[in-house]
Amino acid sequence: WYEGMINSGYEGVREVAKRMRNTMGWSATAGAVDNWVYEDANDTFMADPEMQKKLMDMNPNSFRQMVTTLLEANGRGYWETSEDNLDRLRELYQEVEDRIEGVE
C-alpha cells in the first residue's frame, strides 16, 4: 500500500502521514496498536536513508508530520524505542524543519 502511495508523489506521502497520525489516534482512543506497528513504521520510513530522502524531497511537510507522530507516540507512551532512535528522529526533525524554513 505505502509503496503505491509514495510512488504517486506529493499527495501519496500526505496519505501515508495521515495514516500514521490515525494510527496514533487508535492508540489514544482504543489502545489497540501494538509496539511493533510503530517500530515497523520507523524501520520502513525513518531508518532507511533512501526512503528519508524520497519522502523529504516529495513532501517535506508530510515527512515532518511523520517524524513528529513517532516522537509524539513515544512521548505519550504508545511506542517504546531506544534513546538512540529518538535522538535520530529529533535530528531528522531538525533537518526537515531547516529544509522547510530554507536554512542551510
Image (cartoon, rainbow, N blue to C red):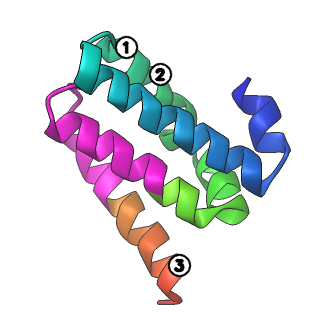
Give the quadrant of residue 59. Answer: bottom right
SS at circle 2: helix
Ranked by sequence position, the earlier of labels 1 and 3 is 1
| Residue occupied by mark 1 | 36
| Residue occupied by mark 3 | 100
Ranked by sequence position, the earlier of labels 2 and 3 is 2
Q: Main secondary structure of the magenta part?
A: helix
Instruction: Verify CB contact (< 8 Å) between mark 1 and mark 2.
Output: yes
Is residue 8 visible in the rendered structure shown here? yes
Q: The disc labelled 1 sits on which kind of residue? A: Trp
Spot occupied by residue 44 in the image (x, y as percentages of width and height): 56, 31
- Is residue 79 highlighted in magenta? yes
Q: Is residue 97 left or right of residue 11?
A: left
Instruction: Verify CB contact (< 8 Å) between mark 1 and mark 3.
Output: no
Seen in the picture, residue 74 relative to 69 is either above or below; the reply is above
Q: Nearer the viewer, mark 2 or mark 3?
A: 3
Query: Could you say which is closer to the camera, residue 100 or residue 104?
Result: 100
Neighbours of disc 1 within 10 Å: few (<14), some (14-19), many (20+): few
- Is residue 37 highlighted in magenta? no
Spot occupied by residue 89 in the image (x, y as percentages of width and height): 34, 51
**Residue located at (38% from left, 25% from top):** 38
Neighbours of disc 3 within 10 Å: few (<14), some (14-19), many (20+): some
Read off the magenta span: 65-90
Spot occupied by residue 65 in the image (x, y as percentages of width and height): 45, 54
Q: Is residue 11 left or right of residue 46?
A: right
**Residue located at (61% from left, 38% from top):** 16
SS at circle 1: helix
Q: Which mark is residue 40?
A: 2
